[in-house]
Amino acid sequence: MELTGFIALYIVMLTAFVGIEIISRVPVILHTPLMSGSNFVHGIVVVGAMVALGHAETTLGQVIGFIGVALGAGNAVGGYVVTERMLEMFKSSKGDKA
């Protein structure tokens, strides 16, 4: 009997729980800098999803891999958009002489 599927499910559930616990304890003011600092992680997720997609042998595996690539890429792009918006808040307006 092969338990790799159950082990993978257990790992996903455990990481989701730990992630929720960690993020829920971050102060609200630090959420945006935390997201901008973790954009590199989203890139690693996209690379991992592409590797999984490349190794997929069944149609279901290819569909799941494609969804993983699409969601990871969307997450990375969204992180950079939020970072750009955050940085815009710190730029001085052109009319200010201060």
Image (cartoon, rainbow, N blue to C red):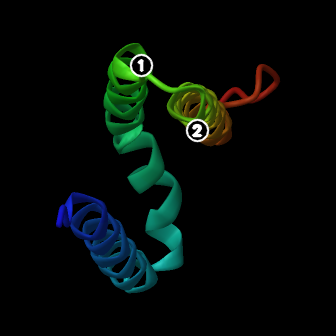
In the picture, the disc for residue 50 is 1
Q: What is the x, y in percent for residue 84?
A: 62, 30
Residue closer to the observer: 64 or 77: 64
Instruction: Say which residue appears at 34% left-offset and 68% top-offset.
Output: 9
Instruction: Say which residue appears at 69% left-offset and 26% top-offset.
Output: 97
Q: What is the x, y in percent for residue 32?
A: 52, 55
40 sits left or right of 85 in the view: left
94 sits left or right of 89 in the view: right
- Does the residue at mark 1 contact the one at mark 2 (Cβ under 8 Å)? no
Q: Amino acid at mark 1?
A: Met
Q: Is residue 41 above or below residue 97?
A: below
Q: Which tag, 1 or 2, sits closer to the chain's start? A: 1
Q: Amino acid at mark 2?
A: Asn
Q: Residue furthest front?
A: 1
Tell me where residue 41 sits by quadrant. top left
Q: What is the x, y in percent for residue 98?
A: 63, 34
The alpha-carbon separation of the residues under discs 1 and 2 comes to 15 Å
Q: Is residue 55 above or below residue 84?
A: above
Quadrant of the rendering where the N terminus is positioned: bottom left
- Report the residue marked by disc 2: 75
